[in-house]
Amino acid sequence: MQTKRRLKKIGVRWPYSYDSAAPLCHGNKRTAMYAAAYLLETFGYELEADRQELEDLAVSIAEGSMKSADITLWFERHSSEM
């Protein structure tokens, strides 16, 4: 369980740091979500979220209403082992 949580945290750090560190324009939110999905897949997890859920997550991160721990929980709820 700890390994699963650690791997998901690694996947989560990309959109959090990318979205919150750079001005959000020209597709940064979308790029961050694709990168997170790719990292999770690399670690053997499949992201289970529709387009609207991903958009809502990205906007919440960009607005600062979700912190790293909240994002980790979101990814835990929206991903499963492949």
Image: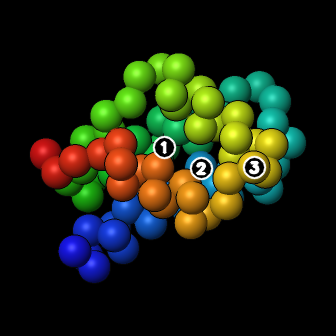
Q: At which x and y percent is residue 10? A: 44, 66
Residue extending farthest left: 82
Spatial CA distance of label 3 from label 1 is: 21 Å
12 is higher (above) or lower (below) than 59: below
Secondary structure state at the residue bearing disc 2: helix
Q: At which x and y percent is residue 11? A: 44, 57
Q: How is the image coloured?
A: rainbow
Q: Which residue is mark 3?
A: 65
Secondary structure state at the residue bearing disc 3: loop
Q: At which x and y percent is residue 37? A: 40, 42
Give the label, 3 or 1, closer to the camera: 3
Horizontal placement of 64 versus 34: left or right?
right
Q: If you read the primary sequence from the N terminus, does the residue marked by circle 3 or circle 1 appear first? A: 1
Question: Which residue is located at x 56 percent, y 66 percent?
Answer: 69
Give the label, 2 or 1, closer to the camera: 2
Circle 2: residue type: Pro
Circle 1: residue type: Ala
Question: Which residue is located at x 61 percent, y 63 percent?
Answer: 68
59 is higher (above) or lower (below) than 36: above
Q: Are marks 2 and 1 in contact (CB under 8 Å)?
A: yes
Q: Which mark is residue 15?
A: 2
Q: Which of the 4 image quadrants contains residue 13? A: bottom right
Q: Which residue is mark 1?
A: 35
Residue extending farthest top: 51
